[in-house]
Amino acid sequence: MTAGAPAARDERLLPVSSLKRLLTRPELGAVVGAAAVFVFFSFAADSFLRASSLSTVLYSASTIGIMAVPVALLMIGGEFDLSAGVMVTSSALISSMFSYQMTANVWVGVGVSLLATLAFGLFNGFMLTRTKLPSFIITLGTFLMLTGLNLGFTKLISGTVSTKAIGDMEGFPSARALFASQWTVGSVTLKVTILWWLALVALATWILLRTRAGNWIFAVGGGADAARAVGVPVVKTRIGLYAGVALCAWISGQHILFSYDVVQSGEGVGNEFLYIIAAVIGGCLMTGGYGSAIGSAVGAFIFGMTSNGIVYAQWNPDWFKFFLGAMLLLATLLNAWVRKRAEATA
Amino acid sequence: MTALIELDGVSKHYGHIKALEGVSLEVSAGEITCVLGDNGAGKSTLIKIIAGLHRHDAGTFRIEGEETELANPRAALDRGIATVYQDLAVVPLMPVWRNFFLGSEPTLGRGPFRRLDVARMRDTTRSELLRMGIDLRDVDQPIGTLSGGERQCVAIARAVYFGARVLVLDEPTAALGVKQSGVVLKYVAAARDAGLGVVLITHNPHHAHLVGDRFVLLKRGAMAGSHTRDSITLDELTRQMAGGSELEELSHELARVAESDERPDRDRDGH
């Protein structure tokens, strides 16, 4: 994006600066990595390039990607959320059990779930900004508490570890259309989560690059004291970021509920790391202040390709985590290297 | 003409510690008042009072002749007092233009379409810096890639652009080399010429004497002297600043050490 052609170019700017500028994009490492993974599985698995396989890849990328977007924003803002994975499950459980127990229209449950999930996010945000403890500790606490509540309440209410089916209840079809529908184009089935994902990436990119809030997110993560000194509402920005994670957890949770009809209360544990991995592969700095929403989408896409590519290549999926870990390390090293090269003052 | 800022016998105590005792100082538009003192002389406390971070316990603090107590840094800013601290309040990884407007970003549009006026932010950053005589290679580069002197200048330009009438600079040359210090002092002078009143905190009498109109010396929280430019020479300022007789004693001691050691090349840089 250029603000008109620069009238007088500075002679001290090297002509290669456009290439260099590209290298400074946080997504670059992830895009290179994604291309490499794509080429690799194209050769390693015959069925990988089929349209149906790609739609499966896109679907699993979208389920991670929807959460990777707010987690990336949160990491740019300098914080973690370890409770993001189980919060998705909590959101689905609340929605399902409230509707079932109250025999209400499922939309009522969906609404209650939205409020409750936002409350979890605000709890994280308030605890962080009030106590000034590291977000790692606060959200680890929330993670464990939510894990316990998910299992405890589900067993208490429905007697088993999963919720009752709500597929025959009022409002289910319309809710399913919004959160879990799919269309078939030729031989390819596309799920609605892909749209949610792309919309969230676009929205987050807009917020980050073109709004005051975006400027504040970068500032809070890159130098909270400096940001406070020039009048940035640091506390509000942090709380808002946690609310964003909660909002997306609600979207993901409703998707799980309305695509499977029942919710397993033990689900979601460990997914928080997948979100963080997608964000980091996508160029977010662990220390905050740097990263992008598009990068997180590329990171999620790499995740989708790897998790499904291994299956298509007919390898034992037990190896998947190893690949994910190796890729995380490689991506982080690549990012660090690229940034150092790009930022070195000539 | 009334002074922009006038401190008269201002004191500040932290518990039973006297951090500042009876300090008087005056800053007028288009003038640079230098506050000189060694570490622990009370310079930081003085800044914090002027910047609105702390309130003074005794004495009077007048802004344009009106007695004031500043409740917080925002109040100081609203009265046109901008403070540039040593850490400069910039976010290193963010581009120069984003840093320039951080916290006061101009926007276009309304409601959900309210967005940053990016073109204006870039152009203003470039032109404001140019006006201060800083010709930046690229306003898109992260501010952390600028030299210490350039960063200091951006922070000063930002304060000037956002309507500061009094600029308080906390040791702007402390971490800089000779050349960079010169550059920064040039911008300090440019701010003065633009009609601002400047409070320059420093422990370097050479830098102070280059640009200062008035000099206030602090020592252990109290005033050790107050001079105007034509009433004091650089040598005298340096001597007073270093504690006069203490310095002479020190030089005798060091001379003895050097003689007995017979290692003349141990001379380290120390202003």
Image (cartoon, coloured by chain):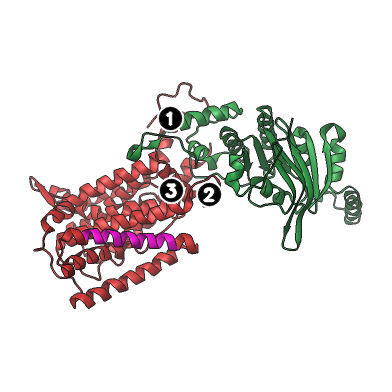
Chain colours: A red, B green
* Residue kind at label 1, given as amino acid type: Ala
Q: Name the residue that disc number 3 marks.
A: A217
Dot 2: element: helix
Residue B149 in sight from this viewpoint: yes
Separation of disc 3 and disc 2 at Cα? 12 Å
Mark 3 or mark 2: name the one nearer the start of the chain. Answer: 3
Is circle 3 on the same chain as circle 2?
yes
Magenta region = A110-127
Dot 1: element: helix
- Give above or below for A257 relative to B230: below
Is circle 2 on the same chain as circle 1?
no
Label pair 1/3, CB-CB below 8 angstroms? no
Residue A18 in the image: state x and y as whole percent. Answer: 41, 32
Residue B155 in the image: state x and y as whole percent. Answer: 59, 38
Q: Quadrant of residue B194?
A: top right
Residue B69 in the image: state x and y as whole percent. Answer: 66, 47
Q: Name the residue that disc number 2 marks.
A: A228
Q: Residues within 10 Å of mark 2 (few under 14, many from 20)?
A: some
Does B45 sit left or right of B266 as displayed? left
